[in-house]
Amino acid sequence: MPHRKLKLMMCLFVFSGLISGISSGQAPSRSPSASTVQNDLAIILKDLSEIDAPGAPGGMCVFGPQAFTVIAGTTGKKGDAELPLVSAARFGLGRIAGLGHTGYFGTESLNKFDTGKLIVNLIRWASDKTNPRIGIIREDKLAKYLKNQGLTVIPLPGKDMAGELKNCDILCCNSDRFGDEEARTALLQFIQKGGGVVGTMTGWGWQQINSRKSLVNDSNGNKLFAEAGIVWSGSMPGRTSDKGYSAKDVPSKYCNALVALDALQTQAAKKINLSKEETIQCVATLSDAVRAIADNNSIFWSRFKLIETSISAAAIPTEKKPITNSDGLAKVILAYQIHKYQSMPSEQVKAHPAATNFPGAVPKDAPRVSERITIKTENPRWHSTGLYAAPGELITVTVPQSASDNKLRLRIGCHSDGLWNNDKWSRPPEITRVFPITNILTKGACAFGGLIYIDVPQKCTLGEIAVQISGAVRAPWYILGKTDPQQWRRTIRNYPAPIAEFQTDKLVISIPSRFMRELDDPEPVMKFWNEVMDACADLAGIDRNRPSPERFVSDVQISVGYMHSGYPLMCFLDAAPRFIKVDHLRNDGDWGMFHEIGHNHQNGDWTFNGAGEVTVNLFSLYILDTVATNAPKHGAIVPESRTKNMKKYFAEGAQFSKWQSDPFLALIMYVQLREAFGWDSFKKVIAQYRTLGNNEHPKNDEEKRDQWMVRFSKVVGKNLGPFFQAWNVPTSDDARKSISDLPAWMPEGFPPK
C-alpha cells in the first residue's frame, strides 16, 4: 500500500487538474489549490486509524470539482472497487461534509474506534475554527459527546434556519432536518458566506422508508449537498476492516465521478492506459453516479451527455458478447440508460435494443389484449397474471377504488436479480420495473418488457379483487388443476410472450417459452414439484398449504453463483429445460435445485456458523429419500467418500475450523444422525424451534450448537455429547451436563482409526 503522503499527492494532482478545467455551473466558488486539499485531508484524517460501521452504512457519490472522498468502503469484499462513505467539499467560502449513516452521531459509534475523533475533525475543518459554535438540531447524543470534548454546543429547534444560524459557525444534524426550500436556501447562503454543515443520512434506508419518493430528487440532504457535488446514494459500502472502515489511506482519486469520467474518456481516445483496477474503480464510481445524481445537476450531466451518443451503440450486452469492465464507457452508458428508463414517465418509455436479446422480443402482430384477473389479496407477494408487457409499450391496470392506495404494486418482469456488482453483464443489470398502485388507474411500461404481476403486501385485508389489465400480450401460463390440457396443447403454449410460467399453489417456475412449447402435458412435472415443496414443508415444520408459492426464475445471468436462493430463487438458462423433464427429476434428481429451495426453508436458530451450506442439504437429502427415490445420492456422501473424508479429517486432528469450511465433510455428521435415528427425529427437533417463546431462541452461536445437541439428544433419548466432542463441534459444559443422564451414543466404528 503506498504511503499516505504519496497517495495524498496522487489525489491532489487529479483534483488540481480537474478544478482548473471544469466549471461547476452552480454557485460561484473558489477553486482550492493542491496544497489546500492536502491540508483539508490532513486535518480531517489526523490521528485516525479506523471508524465504526453502525448497522449497514449507505454510500455517497462525489462529483463536484471541489468535492473529495475522505473514507471509503468497497463495492463488495476487501480489495474490490471503493465506494465513498464519508465525503467533503468546499463551496463558496464555506465547507460541508457528509457521512453515510445517521448512527455516526450516536453514542455507540462516537465511542467506538476513532469515530468520535473523525466527527470532531470534520467539525473543526468545516467551520475552520478550533472551538466553533456548533448548532445541533435534535442530536442529543452528539451534543453530549461534543460537550465532553470541551466544544461549544448550541441546541437549535430547526424552525427558523436563517435566524437560528446567526450565532453558529456550523450546523450538525441528520440531513432530513435541513428543512424545506426556504430553510435550505438559508443554509445555502450560510455555507456560501463561510459557514459549515456536517450531515448524516443512510441513503438506502431513506429510500426504504420513503418508498414512494425519490432519494435522488426528494431527500432534503441531496437537494442541498448536490449544489457542491456531493449526494447520498443507494449503495452500501462494504467494510474495509474487521469491524468497520479503515481511515489510514486516502481513497482512490477515481472515487470522484468527474475524475473517473475524464479517465475513461481519455482511455477511449487511447491517450492513457488505465490498469484493470483503475478501470474497475472508474466503472463502479460512474455506475453509482448515474443513479445518484439528479438529472438537472449540470456539474455532472453537462459533461456526461457530451459523450453518450458516441458510445450508446456499444452498450448492448449479449450472452455471447457481454459488456465487461474493460468496456468502461459502454458499461457506464448502459447504467445511465437504465437509470433514465427506470425514472421516466411510462408514456415516454421506449424499447431498449438489448430487450431483443433478453428477455426477448414480442411479435409486432401479436394481439394486445385486455383481461380481467382475480387477485386473492390474503395471499401476499407476486400474483401471476398470464400477461406480458412488450418492451417499451404502455399497459394500464385498473383496480377498485378500495384497492387504489393499499400498497399494491404493479410489477413488470420477473428477472429481478440485479447485476450491478458483477464484473460482466450478459444482459442489462436491471430489467424489471415496479409501480405503486395509488389510483384506480395505473400506467406502466418497461424498456425491456416482462411478465406482469400484481404485488400484494403482507397482511392485506382487501379480500378478493378484480384487476383489469390492458395493452398486454398473452403468455404461456399453466396452472395445475385449472388449465385444460387440450387448451394447453392447442393454444396456450403457443401464446406469443417470450417468457412463460408453470404454477401450482406451492411453486411457480418462470422459463423461456421456447422450452414450454415442447411440453405436451405439464401435469406430471408440476405434481412432482408439489411433492418437492411438500417434502420441504414437512421437514421444516411448516404447513403444506403455503400463504404464497415460492418462485424459481431462469435468467441469462444471475447476481451470484450458479443458482441462488431468495424470492425469487434464481438459476441460469441452461437449467431451464431440466425443470420440466419429469423422468430426469425422478430418476436423476437435481441436487442444485433442491439445495436452493432448501435455503428458503432453513432456520437460523438451528444453523450455526459454518453450517449454512450444511443444514440446507438436509432438504436435498430428504427430497432424494422421499420424492426422487430412484435418484443417486451426491457423490460426496456415498460410503466410500464419507470414509475417506472422515479418515482424513481425524488424521489431521479434527479441527472444527476444517469442519466449518467443508460442507460435505460436516454433512456426514448429520447423515450419521439420520441413519441412526431417522427423519422423524429431525422433524421433531426442527418443529420445536417453531414454537419457541421470545426468550427461548438461541442468542449466539454457542447457544445454537448447545440447543441443537440438547434438543436432538432429548428427542432420541441418547446423550450426543460424546458424539459432538468426537467431531470437535464445540458445546458448553452446562449443555453436556444437562443430557448426562441419558445413555451415551456413538456410531459403530466411530471415530475412525
Image (tube, rainbow, N blue to C red):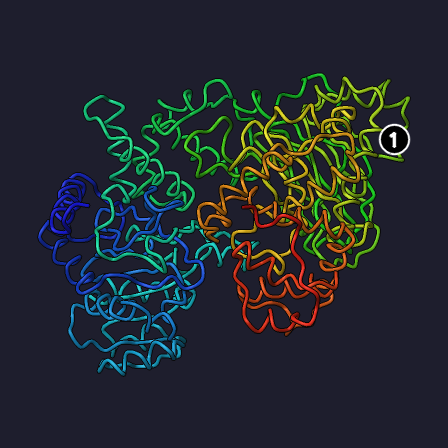
> Label 1 crowding class (10 Å Cα cut-off): few <14, some 14-19, many 20+?
some
Q: Which residue is mark 1?
A: 483
**Residue most extreme to the left:** 35
Question: Eyeballing the image, is 76 above or below 481?
Answer: below
Question: Eyeballing the image, is 522 above or below 132?
Answer: above
Residue 587 on image: x %, y %: 76, 26
Name the kind of residue labelled 1 in the image.
Thr
At mark 1, the secondary structure is loop
| Residue sitting at x 84%, y 29% | 524
The answer to whether 296 appears left or right of 122 in the picture is: right
Residue 333 on image: x %, y %: 40, 30
The answer to whether 47 appears left or right of 316 in the picture is: left
Q: Quadrant of residue 189?
A: bottom left
The answer to whether 657 appears left or right of 91 in the picture is: right
Question: Eyeballing the image, is 339 above or below 729?
Answer: above
Residue 33 on image: x %, y %: 10, 50
| Residue sitting at x 21%, y 26% | 273
The answer to whether 51 appears left or right of 514 in the picture is: left
Q: Quadrant of residue 347?
A: top right
- Front in this rendered view, residue 553 or 447: 553
- Front in this rendered view, residue 578 or 9: 578
